[in-house]
Image (cartoon, rainbow, N blue to C red):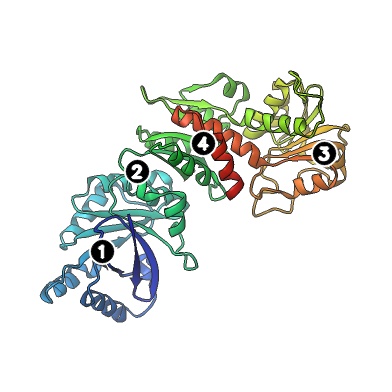
Amino acid sequence: MRILHCILATHISTVVYNGDPNARLTSSGAGRKWEGGQYEGDEHKRLEALRLAHDLGADYIDFELKVASEMIGELENKHRNGGKVIVSSYLNGATPSKEKLGDLVASMQATGADMIKVVSNADDITEMERIFYLLSHCQVPAVAYSVGERGLISQLLCPKFGGALVYGSMEGNSIPGLPTLDSLKEAYKVDCIDSDTKVFGLVSKPVSHSKGPLLHNPTLRHANFNGIYVPMFVDDLKKFFDVFASPDFAGYSVGFPYKEAVVQFCDEVHPLAKSIGAVNTIIRRPGDGKLIGYNTDCEGSITAIEDALRDQKHVNGRSLNSPLAGKQFVVVGAGGAGRAIAVGARSRGARLIVFDIDLERAKCLARAVSGEARHFESLAHFQPENGAILANATPIGMHPSTDRIPAAEETLGNYQLVFDAVYTPRKTRLLKDAAAAGAITVSGVEMFLRQAIGQFNLFTGREAPKDFMRKIVLAKF
C-alpha cells in the first residue's frame, strides 16, 4: 500500500492508496461544503483546478456525482490521458438502506466512473454493515466510509471488505472524522489488512480515550496473527451484536459503561465473570459462533496490587498468603471494574468497603463480597484504617477532567497503597497526591497491561508475548 499526496483544489489531505506501484499523483474535488465536503471556495475555480490536474497527468481525479457526467464527457473529448475518474457522493444524515445505496451506486457507475466513492455521516455504528456490504458487492473499484467516531471502523476496515483506497488526514491539517495518516500507517497498519483479517475491538462509549489499539495491534503483528483491533463506539448493545454477527468479528474488549450490561448478550459466561457480574472480554467461539464472556480485569488488578506490596517489602518473603489478607480494602465505584476488583480482593481475604454514587448498587456489590456499602458523598469524611488499600474504579481523574480525585486528600497518608484504574493520564492526580502522602501507588496502566495479556490469550488461543507487550506500554503509554 502506497501513500499519495492528494491535491484538493485549495485543501490538502492525504490518501493511502492500494494500487499501481507507478502511480504518481491523485487530485480530488474536496467536496463542496453544502454537500458534506470541506471545500468552501469558488466553484468555477475548483473545477478549473481539476481540469488542470487532468492536463498535468493526475492519476486520479475526483468529481461529485452532480457534475460527473458533464466533466467526464468533457475530459473524453480532450482525449483522456490515462488518468482515472473517481465519482463521489457525500450523503447527509444516516447511511441509507442497502437498496438505496445500490441505486446510488448504479447511477454513479452510469457516469462512466473508473471508481466510486460514497461518504456518509453515521448516526450509529451498525450502519457500517451497509457500507461493508456496498464495498464487497460493488462491480467497480469503490471507496465507502462514514466520518466520526461511530464510523471509524468503516475507514479502518475498508481494505478488508474490498475498498480500493483508505483516506486519512495529515498531521497539522486534520479533517474532522478522518483518522490521521500516521495512525493508519503505524497503529493500524492498514496495508496488512486483507479479507481474512479477524476483527477485534473495544465496545465502549466513548472510545477516543482508549489506548488498546496502540497495544493490541503491534502485538498481533508481532505474533504473526492476522487480526486488527479497532475502537467501536456503540450506542445500543443489542443492535450491535445482532448486526455484527459474522465470524469476521471474532472478539471484543468491553469498556465503560457496558461491562455489566453486556453479560445478558453473552451466550455463555465464564464462572469468574459470572461471580463478578461483569464481562470485559468476549470471544466468538469459532465452532458455533456463540459469544462467550470472560473477565480479565479481576486478576489484572489484584495481581498488580499484590506485586506492588511485595516489591516494596511490605510483606515478608513471597508467602503463599496474599498480602491483602485481613486488610481493609476500600473500593470506589461499584460498576464493572469495581466489581472485578472487589471480588478479587475478597478472594484474597480482604475486608471490603464499597462506595458508589448509587447506594443500592454499592449495597448489591457489598452483599456479594460480604462487605459494607456507603454512599460516595461520605467518602470525603471517611477515615480509613492505617495500612488500608484504596482502589479507584470510577472515571474520576480521567482525561480531560484530570484535576479531580475521589477521596479526601488529607486521608491519603493513611493508606498503605492507592490504586487507580484510570490510565489516561498514566499518573493521575490521585496517584501523585497519594505518592506525596507516602503511599505506594499502582497505575491503571499496570492493570490495563495485565488484563490485555489475558485478552490476547483469549483472542488468539496463544500465549501472549508478555515482555513485548510490556515494552510497548513503557514506550507508548
Which label sits in the foreground, 3 or 2? 2
- Are the residues at dot 3 and dot 2 in contact (C-beta closer than 8 Å)? no
Mark 1 is on which residue type?
Answer: Ala
Label 4 vs label 2: CA separation? 20 Å
Q: Is the residue 264 above or below the residue 91 in the image?
A: above
First in sequence: mark 3 or mark 2? 2
Name the side, left or right, on which 464 lies relative to 300: left
Label 1 vs label 4: CA separation? 39 Å
Q: Which residue is label 3 attached to?
A: 378
Q: Is the residue 387 above or below the residue 85 in the image?
A: above
First in sequence: mark 4 or mark 2? 2
Mark 2 is on which residue type?
Answer: Glu
In the image, 192 versus 433, the foreground residue is 192
Q: Is the residue 339 above or below the residue 272 in the image?
A: below
Q: Horizontal and vertical percent for residue 367?
A: 72, 22
Q: Horizontal and vertical percent for residue 70?
A: 17, 72
Q: Quadrant of residue 421?
A: top right
Q: Is residue 367 visible?
A: no
- Are the residues at dot 1 and dot 2 in contact (C-beta closer than 8 Å)? no
First in sequence: mark 3 or mark 4? 4
